[in-house]
Image: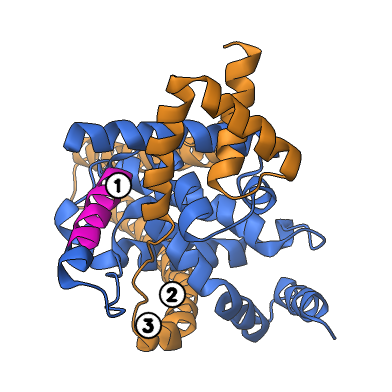
Chain colours: A blue, B orange
Amino acid sequence: MNTNEAEYSLLIKARNGNKEAYGEIVKIYMRRAYFSALTLLGSHDDALDISQEAFIRAYRAIKKFDINKKFFTWYYQILKNLCLNHLRDKFRHSINFSNIYELLENIKDNGQDVEIMVERNETKKIVWEALWKLPPEDREIITAKDIVNASYEEIAELLQIPTGTVMSRLYNARKKLRKIIEEMR
Amino acid sequence: MNNLTERFQYLITKALDGNLNSEEKVEFEKLISESKDFQNEWNSLKEIKEVTKSMKFKEPPQELWDKYWLSVYSRLERGIAWILISIGASIILIYGGFKLIESIIGDATLTWILKTAILAIIIGFVLLLVSVIRERFFLKKTDKYKEIIR
């Protein structure tokens, strides 16, 4: 049984109310779910809470899920709505910048000159902060491409938009990011 | 936006992501060599891309993943518990309310005007509650914008 078949079988069981099977689905996608929420929310606690809440809502609505489609694409719509509603409802459009650096992994010491390493980390911090000043949808698309390294087709499927739109949105988001960086320097 | 700018946007996006084929690469290099603006845009966006592609989210401790499903499962169970508690509480409230009305009507020591006032308050409260529940229920069922992110 290949991965798709195994997942299909788990989804069938989950649709029939088997929580253990659904647990396996959650375990497959929990990392992706958490990091997707983190991209939009910029807070570890919120990302954890909302990604779990989205799994709960997905389970309650699993009878509506078209078993022939990809689970994560469907789940992501629930997750994104929850994240954006969370930002709107709690007036949390402004990200807490004192926390965002904790989410970033520092450049590792690969025998580089300490000065160069510090400078690179500083540049990285500026770009990172600028990234969090972008609207969530722009941050989402840049993160998907540059940090997660997803293909245009994968992003198109996830966001349910044509590939051409992915490219134009990516271009515009990158230009916005550049503008913010220029203003910060 | 003219066709050339649109074409440049398409090519620069693919160039930044390393997706240009050999023909597009030649076309793109020609475009940036002929226009200072295109050249500047390419340099500035390339610089940012180099930084963003080196970024990684910090991985949370393994403990978080170990407990992730358990936490989802507990919350799922708690949801069911809340539903049961709500059903139980509603039944008790309705029964209690019915008994209260029954005792007020049957109480010979209360004057009819006081009985009417107490009953009016109780009925008014019930009507208000039913109205709010109905409104919420129908709004949820018929709200055509419910899928839209507000």
Q: Position of residue B26 (x, y in %)?
A: 68, 35
Element marked by disc 1:
helix
Q: Residue at x 26, y 74 (%)?
A: A112
Q: Position of residue A45 (x, y in %)?
A: 29, 67
Element marked by disc 3:
helix
Magenta part of the chain: A119-132
Which residue bears the numbered disc 2? Answer: B75
Q: Position of residue A48 (x, y in %)?
A: 37, 68
Is A18 contained in the magenta span? no
Q: Is residue A100 left or right of residue B63?
A: left
Which residue bears the numbered disc 3? Answer: B64
Element marked by disc 2:
helix
Which three-letter amino acid code belongs to the residue tagged 1? Trp
Q: Is residue A136 left or right of residue A70?
A: left
Looking at marks 2 and 3 on the same chain, the residue that comes earlier in the sequence is marked by 3
Q: Is residue B111 left or right of residue A4?
A: left
Is A121 contained in the magenta span? yes
